[in-house]
Structures are given as C-alpha cells and as structure tokens.
Image (cartoon, rainbow, N blue to C red):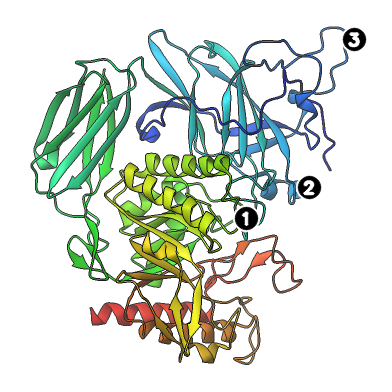
Amino acid sequence: MYRPLLVCLSIFCSLTMAVHGHALIQNPDARNQQSLNGDWHIIVDPYENGFYNHRYEEKPNGYFKDAKMQHPSDLIEYNFSASPTLRVPGDWNSQKESLFFYEGTIWYRKAFESKKQNGKRYILYFDAVNYEAIVYLNGEKLGRHEGGFTAFQFDATKALKKGMNTLVVKVNNRRERDFIPTVNTDWWNYGGITRPVRLLEVPQDYLADYTVKLQNDKIAFHAVSSSQKKNQTIRLHIPELGINEKYSTDGEGKVTAILKAKPELWTPENPKRYSLTVSLNGEKIKDNIGFRDIAIRNGDILLNGKPVFLKGISIHEEAPTREGRAWTEEDARTTLTWAKELGCNFIRLAHYPHNEAMLKVADEMGLLVWSEIPVYWTVLFEREDVYAKAEQQLEEMIERDKNRASIILWSVANETPNHQVRLAFLKKLVKKARQLDNSRLITAAMDTQTDNGGSKIIDDPLAGEVDVIGVNSYCGWYGGTPQSCASLHWLSPYNKPVIISEFGGGALKGLHGEVNERWTEEYQAAVYEHNLTMISKMDFVRGTTPWILKDFRSPRRPLPVIQDYWNRKGVLSEKGERKLAWKILHDFYENLTSSE
C-alpha cells in the first residue's frame, strides 16, 4: 500500500477556474513531435499536502520547486526519483491494485531531453487527463484544465529548455457535484493521464486549425494561422480531385474558400477518403478526409440524400483485451471489428468523447458515429459555471473531431431529468453545437415517456429542440417482463427520426437457466428478442444502439459472483466472449440488410 508523500508546490490554485492555452491545434498526429509516453514517477497525495508545503518560490503564476537534498540536515519529505512509476497513457486503477478504488490527487513527473531549436514554437499536448490537470514545466505553471475526456494544450516555448526538462502534472479524479459529469455515474472513474502526451514542434506562425467538408455539392475549406497576420500563404492539395490551390490569409490570419469538385461520397459500404495536405510556413499537415452529407426529412435520416437505418451498438471506452481505459489504435480496431461482425453500420460512443483513434478508425472502417459529452443524469443545471464546463467540453469535442466523416450526430446529454431549468441549459448547448458545426445533426438520449391509454408516448420538450430523438427504454429489465415488451405500443408526437439509444439487460457469460431467471444468458436473449419485436412496430424508429457491446467496470454494480463491479449488460463479456443475445441482435441486423 502506498504511503502519501509530500510534494512542494507554490500556492493554492483555484479549483474552479479553467486555464487554457490557445485554441486546440488540429490533427496533432500529423505534426513533428516528441512522445512523452512511458513510465512517469508518481506521488499519491490524498490530502493534497503538496499544495501547502512551505518550500516554494513566490512567482505570479506559481512555481513548483522539485527540491533535492543539498545537505544532510535538509528536511524534504518527498522524492520523485525514489517513488514508484505508472505507465502513461494509462489509468492508475487498473495498473496497481492498491489504487483500484482510489479517487484523489496523484502527482506525475517525467524527465525528458529536448532538442529545442530557435525559431520554433513548442506545444505541450495532452489527449486527455481525468479529471483535473495542473501542469508545470521546469517549475513554471503552464495552466490548468478541467474535463476528463477532451484534449488540451499549452504553449511550452518559453518554459522549455534545450537539454533536460522536468514535467510535473497534478492529476485529480475526485468526483464533485459541480463537475461534468457529476458525482454519480454508471462507469468506472478511471484516474490518470489516460491518453498520450506529446511535445509538438511547429513554426512560429503555424497552421492552428482547418476544416475540409462537403457543402452544397462543393468542398468548403477553412484554415486559420496561429497568428493574425495578413498575406500568409496557406496551400490545399488534394491530388485525386485535382485540387492544388494557394490562398492568402486575411487580417485575422484566416482563409475561407469554396471549391468546385465532385468527390466520391463516403458511406459505410464504401468509406472513401481522400489524402490531402494543408501547408503553411514549411509545415505540411497530411490528413485523410471523407466527404458525405447528413440530413433529416419527413422523419427519415438521409445519408447522401438516401434514407438510412442506423444498425448500431453503444460502446464505453473500455479496453477490449485488458482491464482499464482504451486508448490505442489496436484497441479501436478490435472494438470496431466486433461492431462490424455484429452487423453494425453505426456506433454510439457513450457517454463522453472517446479517444481520437476511435474516430479515425471509424472513418476508415465505415462506421457512422454518435459522439457525446458527459452531461449525464443530475448535473447542477441552475449553475452558470457548470454550464460553462459543459460548453467547454462540447467545444473541445467538436474542435478535435470536426473533420471526421464518420460523425453524424453530436449528443448534448444522456438521461437528464425533465424540468425547465434543465431544458434551458440543454437548449443553450444545442444552439452552441449548431453554431460550432452546422454540418451534422444534434441529438440527446432521453428516458421521459408517459403512459396514455395503453400506449407509451415520447414526452420530453427537449425532443422538440434536437434533430434526432434518442430514447432509452429498459422494458424487461427495469420494468415488466421480457415477454411484455413485444406488445407495447409507442407513439411520437414529433415528425422526427427516433433512435432507440438504449435497451437491454444483464447476463453473466456462461450462466444458463430458465428464460425467466435473472442474470442468465437466456433472460438477456429474451429481453433482446421481445424488445426488437417492439422496435419493429415503431414506424418512426430509424436506428438502435442497444446497451452495450461489452461488459464494463462500474462501482454501482457490486453483486458478488454475478457482477463483481462489472456492468453485465454487454452482448460480449469483459473478455470479448459472445453471449446468446449477440446472435439475436446479429440476426436482426442481418435481416434488415437483406430487406433493404
């Protein structure tokens, strides 16, 4: 068991103020970079004594003094070099048994060598840290970020040294009522630096952002320089489409252009992508981008003008072949291959933005995507600062993934209670999402239904605000018997497409029994069979994402022998083994495909 050690930190930092660098850089994978992954020394600090130790130097932004003993009489009650290590990327819960349930602060330190060059800028880029990160480079505080599933960055140019450098990150995964998500969730609160860390080397004036997308049968191109200088040259090259153009930035360092072209459109059956290069000041950024259109009309979802039924599954960011958070391309390929084998053309990434590899592999494999922020259950909807956190995560999700053709839906919430304050909160998020990206549809998963004369009616004013209505319904698991579901009749007062965004039940792989016996594979299969019969009669349904692809860790699920802190609603076990419900869903999707 770890003993908490003391860390020297300058001054108390506000836990409510989010400090950012500049806008999130687009496509960090394509930049010149140094990986900071690997073993980091850690100090477990449940009392946060590192904030209050008196050995610090007072500076305007705070100063972290990684002190060393100089004399035998020195009293320094911590030593990173002698402390244990954790792998980055990675969560601490699955790496060390003593940290399995740990929620609180851990200090991370990485020593690395830099070949810093004059005339370059250096950006410290974190793909994600759960939940709060405060970052120090060579003692200088770079800033703070809140939110466990979105990327963030800081300009490290001034603090970086040529030669050896010390990077310290205070990571805190403690749950708080005013966080997004709030204190109560149904997934594991994996703490740590859970996704890659890299040091990006870019020109002084670099290509900060770009968007390339289909717009009214043409290609819309938008690019932004990190500076606001006029007359910088930005080039766009798409060889296969014969596009090789150069543009001069305006007074804000921006370029906007519409290009005539007839790209082959991206579909799940043919996920065509085009190799392109965007360049500025000698930096050439390569990407692979698909072009497609998504819209709704008369209750249908139209992909490239044609109605599509979304044969989906919900997915948590749980590693497919080991315990802990997923983050690698291999994790993404394994998980999405399972979805394809199930017969899916669509996935719901619940309940937060997943790692960037998932989106890039989905682009490649031809899987449509629902991407979501963790406005989950009972957040403090009346608080303006809480809304600001939700909007920040929405912006960071859209900023990172706007060039991914696979994403067709931005989701602003899951299972939130129906009241006016919540509605005002979510209406603002819907409006913001449309301002940030008008090329995709907006949705939310709702569980508000009323009974009327034997029928279930979708009854949530939020349904009037979104483009596509998500409905969570657990008939046969949280209410009624599996057999009762087939005869349920549903009504929708909205002329909008509906996705049954959650249904299902739990089963322990290998546990068999009667069809009415909880936790058996037979019971779960019956839930699927009768819910799918119910869904087949709902003429306004345009897709489903049953809950869920694979069993996942959850502290809400302690039942010994059966759950053991696993949510057992997966059609696959935690080891990727197929349950009986897998075949029920697979055959349903296969029959849909053959009838199309």
Is residue 395 shown left or right of residue 12?
left
* Residue annotated with mark 2: 98
Q: Quadrant of residue 76?
A: top right
How busy is the neighbourhood of tag 3: few (under 14 within 10 Å), some, or many (20 plus)?
few
Where residue 343 appears, as percent x and y from the top left, is 36, 72
Estimate how packed mark 2 is, as few (under 14), some (14 to 19) or many (20 or more) residues with alpha carbons within 10 Å. Answer: few
Where residue 385 sits: x, y (%)? 57, 39
Kindly identify the amino acid type of the residue bearing the numbered disc 1. Answer: Glu
**Residue 287 percent location from the top left of the image:** 28, 38
Q: Is mark 2 on a helix, strand or loop?
A: helix
Q: Which residue is drawn at 77% across and 32% down?
A: 48
To which residue does mark 1 refer? 323
Q: Which amino acid type corresponds to the residue marked 2 in the rendered image?
A: Ser
Q: Is residue 482 left or right of residue 369?
A: right
Front in this rendered view, residue 142 or 460: 460
| Image quarter in which the C terminus is found | bottom left
Three-letter code for the amino acid on which mark 3 is drawn: Pro
Depth order, front residue of 147/330: 147
Counting residues from the start of the chain, the first of labels 2 and 3 encountered is 3
Can residue 148 be seen here? The reply is no
Residue 592, compared with residue 380, is above or below; it is: below
Q: Are marks 2 and 3 in contact (CB under 8 Å)?
A: no
The kind of secondary structure element at disc 3 is loop
Q: How far apart are marks 1 and 2 (CA)?
A: 15 Å
**Within the image, what quadrant is residue 33 found in?**
top left
